[in-house]
Image (tube, helix red, strand yellow):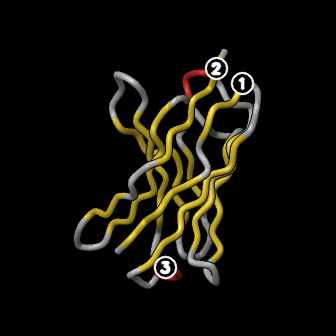
């Protein structure tokens, strides 16, 4: 299993960024996949998840600002982040739970005030 996230960067508060996670080594289309993040000095938290059928769930802190989506043909998970806040600064990971937990390497998002 490989989960390769990209798209992070530095953005001003109020700006937008889009993350991608290219997945391989498992049957992407039938599995729920997630985005997690770990901010400086914070615990890792679930940001958003999306089921094989496209049902999305979000953390309260990002509801209405972030959108998770997937392209099964491209085996890619996305996270569109709008109205970014400094507290969104974190390392963002894509995640898959099978019999084991699989984590991507992560991509850094930094939001300046």
Q: Nearer the viewer, residue 70 or 63?
A: 70
Residue 112 sits in quarter:
top right
Query: What secondary structure is found at the residue carrying circle 2?
Result: strand
Query: What secondary structure is found at the residue carrying circle 3?
Result: helix
For the point 40% across and 36% down, the residue is: 38
Work out whether 64 lies above or below 69: above
Query: What secondary structure is found at the residue carrying circle 1?
Result: strand
- Judged left or right of residue 34, residue 73 is right
Quadrant where the C terminus sits is: top right
Q: Earlier in the sequence, mark 1 or mark 2?
A: 1
Work out whether 34 lies above or below 29: above
The residue carrying mark 1 is 12
The residue carrying mark 3 is 28
Residue 35, x across and y down, in percent = 49, 52
For the point 55% across and 23% down, the residue is: 87
Please tell me how crowded label 2 is: few (under 14), some (14-19), or many (20+) other residues with Cα within 10 Å.
some
Quadrant where the N terminus sits is: bottom left
Task: Please identify, in this view, whether the residue under mark 3 or under mark 2 is nearer the observer.
Answer: 2
Task: State the mark number for residue 112.
Answer: 2
Residue 46 sits in quarter:
top left
Task: State the mark number for residue 90.
Answer: none
For the point 23% across and 73% down, the residue is: 99
Q: Earlier in the sequence, mark 3 or mark 1?
A: 1
Query: Marks 1 and 2, how far apart in space?
Result: 5 Å
- Judged left or right of residue 58, residue 105 is left
Residue 77, x across and y down, in percent = 58, 65
């Amino acid at each position: 299993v490989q989960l390769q996230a990209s798209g992070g960067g530095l953005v001003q508060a109020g700006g937008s960024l889009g993350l991608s996670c290219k997945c391989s080594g498992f049957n992407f289309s039938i599995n729920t996949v997630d985005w997690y993040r770990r901010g400086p000095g914070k615990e890792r938290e679930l940001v958003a998840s999306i089921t094989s059928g496209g049902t999305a769930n979000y953390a309260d802190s990002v509801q209405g600002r972030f959108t998770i989506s997937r392209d099964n043909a491209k085996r890619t998970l996305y996270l569109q982040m709008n109205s970014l806040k400094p507290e969104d600064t974190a390392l963002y990971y894509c995640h898959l739970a099978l019999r084991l937990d699989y984590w991507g390497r992560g991509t850094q998002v930094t939001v300046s005030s």
